[in-house]
Amino acid sequence: TLENYYLLYKDVILEQIKIYQPTIIINSTGNSLPVLREDIKEIKQNLSETIYIKTSDLGVDFSVNKELIVFNTYHPMANRPNRNVYCNDIINNYLLLTQKS
């Protein structure tokens, strides 16, 4: 299962996140792998804000100063809302979160 593979490579994945310090992570396991979401929050403890976008079943976790945004969504090949809705929700919410006031 996906969770078995994640657990097998968990240390490598988390080490990559620590080393590369990404500003965006797209967790395309959706709600099927909540352990990844919690592990990311453990290494990025200021990841404290969450919003939910109903149109594409998209969860977004982000830090208060927005140095990391995590999109928790399903895999793009899943038969969920159409690709335009999926992509637009990710792009539009990234832009909303990162626009300077």
Image (tube, rainbow, N blue to C red):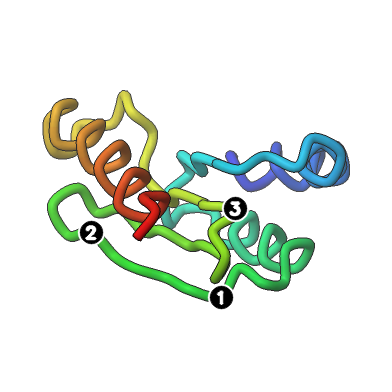
Residue on which the image places disc 3: 68
Horizontal side, residue 52 vs residue 10: left or right: left
The mark nearer the N terminus, 1 or 3, is: 1
Residue on which the image places disc 1: 48
Q: CA distance from mark 2 to mark 3?
A: 18 Å
* Mark number, residue 86: none
**Which residue type does callout 3 highlight?**
Leu
Horizontal side, residue 50 vs residue 34: left or right: left
Q: CA distance from mark 2 to mark 1?
A: 17 Å
The spot of residue 35 in percent (x, y) is: 63, 61
**Which residue type does callout 1 highlight?**
Ser
Q: Residues within 10 Å of mark 1 (few under 14, many from 20)?
A: few
Which residue is drawn at the image coordinates 70% and 42% (left, top)? 6
* Mark number, residue 53: 2
- Asked whether the beta carbons under mark 1 and mark 3 sit within 8 Å of each other, the answer is no
Which residue is drawn at the image coordinates 72% and 72% (left, top)? 45
| Snapshot quadrant of residue 13 | top right
The spot of residue 90 in percent (x, y) is: 31, 40
Farthest residue, direction front: 101
**Which residue type does callout 2 highlight?**
Ile
| Snapshot quadrant of residue 95 | top left
Camera-side mark, 2 or 3:
3
Horizontal side, residue 4 vs residue 74: left or right: right
Judge whether 26 appears above or below 44 on screen: above
